[in-house]
Amino acid sequence: MNPVFSLPVRVYYEDTDAGGVVYHANYLRFMERARSEWLTHLGLEHADLARDHALLFVVRSALLDFLRPARLADRLTVDLRIVQMRRSSMVFAQHVLREDECLCRGEVVIVAVGASTFKPCGIPAAVQHLLGPWLPAVPTE
Amino acid sequence: MNPVFSLPVRVYYEDTDAGGVVYHANYLRFMERARSEWLTHLGLEHADLARDHALLFVVRSALLDFLRPARLADRLTVDLRIVQMRRSSMVFAQHVLREDECLCRGEVVIVAVGASTFKPCGIPAAVQHLLGPWLPAVPTE
Amino acid sequence: MNPVFSLPVRVYYEDTDAGGVVYHANYLRFMERARSEWLTHLGLEHADLARDHALLFVVRSALLDFLRPARLADRLTVDLRIVQMRRSSMVFAQHVLREDECLCRGEVVIVAVGASTFKPCGIPAAVQHLLGPWLPAVPTE
Amino acid sequence: MNPVFSLPVRVYYEDTDAGGVVYHANYLRFMERARSEWLTHLGLEHADLARDHALLFVVRSALLDFLRPARLADRLTVDLRIVQMRRSSMVFAQHVLREDECLCRGEVVIVAVGASTFKPCGIPAAVQHLLGPWLPAVPTE
């Protein structure tokens, strides 16, 4: 299994709605926070990617399953692992957990685009090198 | 084809991010605004559903394709149509458009849950009746 | 009295919190929507100000009184009028109303800054000209 | 001087806007996060206040000075101290800092209200007791 990165997230009033639970769109925010902290952990900041590689990572698609509601003051964990790597994109599996209970599950496809063109571009070798340890193992025969 | 409901949405600073475009999670907000205005249009308010039927409509899953970025001050249209109806859930196809250009496409599954239990419950007959004209036509042979 | 600009705003789930009311920070968003639509009404878009005048209008300070809570599905009106004009800044009085009832009152100071420097700069004469009809009348003796 | 409570906050894409900086309303969110974590630190959760005391703390007014922009990936500190205590309200002085630099300064008045009435009510003695160590010292003559 490939490694998992985790970020603790606390639920504040701003995250909830009048249903008394976390507003559904905010799980996407939580997942993005985890991906951003993971990039920082790799030594890759969005600003560096833009400056050094004229590159933005943008969300190309997302599939979200909202399984159970998170509530005010909950202490959540948001994780990620890479399940697929392509020339200019990565597929992340992500979970928002309260202890062992999965509240929201996501599959998020991130694509590298030119910072001004917003057109897909290959992920630079230097970045790919840093991603190496996070890639799913290729089964050997 | 079943009918389409549309809502105009303007992009403000609050909707954008430092990439200069609409923050991806906010397309889910735009889609929810369209569903809420459509309920109002049907004579169904969230508050009425809660009071009269002890019912909440919650998002069970969402599949989003982010095709092109929306930008500050864009005038968008957010549409919806029902593509499937089940006992306690509905599947919506939704688009966020800038003129004829589709910027984001979503498939959103909404489920009726008890307002306090958050457990799925059947959509009441009175509500189903109002939804009738919006359902996909059943092909006749 | 100087003229008032008004914008209708509907309250959606995204605007509310687990207290069942509009989250306090979101009144600042509503006020900014009114100022943005007013600039559009004047023929001034943020993007044009940036491109033609290398200018951003940023919020320098805000004083907010939260008088009564707005709730889900409320139909609000957000208004603005200019109460003071200086070389590089404007003071707006703003209200968020539900019918005749004032829910939130704000005084917002906007300053013109260089788009890259973020340093205050004079409001260009062409922009001042457009603002003219919105300025408070100078009392004559 | 009375004690200061501090919370680290990281800036993510969700917090920024197309101006490339943190959207002004989000400083109010950061300040609320600090107040919520401080209540937790005192052993007071919003949910407990609602259940045990039928009490909500709501924001009555806020005065904000936006001094310098925070940017994507900044590591901020949000602090608070109580500068005044009344029967049913508290006045907080708050700062959002990047290292030693103050980016935003706020004075936020919080009032205790009945959870269903939203009318001001006295802060219960048990809560006042926990707040004691955080109150400004009364000067002795």
Image: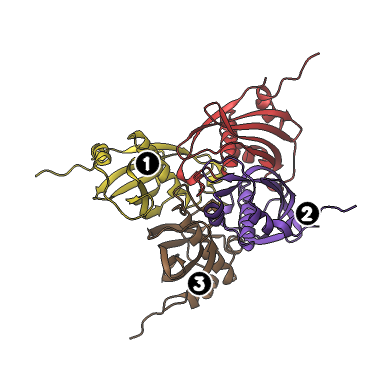
Chain colours: A brown, B yellow, C red, D purple
Residue under numbered circle 3: A5
Measured along the vertical axis of the image, is residue C13 above or below residue D51?
above
> The disc labelled 2 sits on which kind of residue?
Pro
Q: What is the spatial separation of the Cα atoms under label 3 and label 2, in whole angstroms? A: 42 Å
Residue under numbered circle 2: D136
Measured along the vertical axis of the image, is residue D69 above or below residue C64?
below
Q: Quadrant of the C terminus of chain B?
A: top left
Q: Using the rendered image of the protein, determine whether residue D109 is visible from the camera's viewpoint.
A: no
Residue at x-position 36% and y-position 47%: B56
Q: Using the rendered image of the protein, determine whether residue A94 is visible from the camera's viewpoint.
A: yes
Does A48 sit left or right of C113 as displayed?
Answer: left
* Residue D118: image location, x then y, percent: 56, 41
Answer yes or no: are tags 1 and 3 on the same subunit. no
> The disc labelled 1 sits on which kind of residue?
Arg
* Residue B110: image location, x then y, percent: 33, 50
**Chain of the residue on which disc 3 is drawn:** A
* Residue B111: image location, x then y, percent: 32, 51
Element type at mark 2: loop
Measured along the vertical axis of the image, is residue A91 above or below residue D138?
below
10 Å crowding of disc 2: few (<14), some (14-19), many (20+) = some
Element type at mark 1: helix
Residue under numbered circle 1: B51
Q: What is the spatial separation of the Cα atoms under label 1 and label 2, in whole angstroms? A: 46 Å
